[in-house]
Image (cartoon, helix red, strand yellow):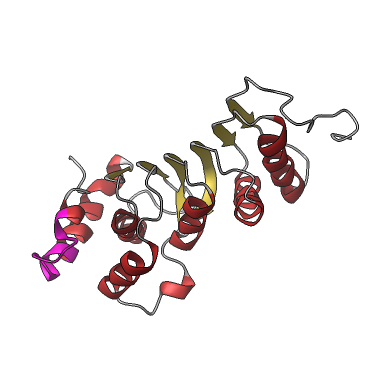
Amino acid sequence: MLEQYAVFAPHKFKQLRHIAVAETTYKDSHMASAVAQFVHRASPTARTVNIMDGKSGEKLLCAAVHSHHLTRLQVLYIKHSQLTLTDITAVLTAMPQLSELYCMCTGLGDEYASVSFMQLAEYMHQNFYPLNIAFSVWEIVHNYNTPIANIEAAKDMALCTMLLSVVCPNFMRARIGAQHKRPYNSFIKKTVALNPIGRFAKKFKGLLQPL
């Protein structure tokens, strides 16, 4: 139906810069595909996408990574979507102009579970730097399926933030909830203490949250 009414006609919405999608009854994959196509074909000026449905947001990322339809996007709000570090690195690769990301954090991902943190930091810097020079802001939305004071959640935030700072030269600090700041800072300080003169130590210290 969208094609029938020329919704995806090339450059149809030349001035549209912000797109917001509320929860719908459409299948997640269909919604994600439609948004990706719309941004790519109908609105080359679109710079911000806000998807309020978690599953659709995650599907959108898959569509974007595989289709390269969102290469010009600068701000992505998917606050109800849960992303691992693996997901985020894929997003930052597929969206080279992305400067702001709003999502939940679910840790490093299974593929990194058995690797020590410093080994992973060295590996990522060697193989991915610079991953995305535009990326500067990551707002980590609290996952309300976990307790507010969940220590593991703060640890996941700290680990992912440190690793993103290793590969994204202009990323300096994440925005996190006040309830997570103390344990978040604690994990970063412990990491720096293990190698206080290491090449990433100064970068990691810059990630500490003001209390």
- Specify the farthest residue to the top: 15
Q: Position of residue 206 (x, y in %)?
A: 18, 48
Reply above or below: 137 against 106: above
Q: Is residue 10 left or right of residue 66?
A: right
Q: Is residue 78 left or right of residue 60?
A: left
Q: Position of residue 137 (x, y in %)?
A: 36, 40
Query: Which contiguous range is marked in magenta?
Result: 191-202
- Specify the farthest residue to the left: 197
Q: Quadrant of the C terminus?
A: top left
Q: Quadrant of the N terminus?
A: top right
Q: Which is nearer the eye, 121 or 208?
A: 121
Reply above or below: 26 against 67: above
Q: Which is nearer the eye, 56 or 132?
A: 132
Q: Position of residue 175 (x, y in %)?
A: 33, 41
Q: Is residue 196 magenta?
A: yes
Q: Is residue 7 left or right of residue 119?
A: right
The residue shown at (63%, 31%) is 44
Q: Is residue 100 left or right of residue 9?
A: left
The residue shown at (75%, 31%) is 10
- Specify the farthest residue to the bottom: 114
Count of residue discs: 0
The residue shown at (54%, 44%) is 80
The residue shown at (73%, 37%) is 24
Q: Position of residue 174 (x, y in %)?
A: 32, 44
Choose top left, top right, bottom left or bottom right for residue 38.
top right
Q: Is residue 187 magenta?
A: no
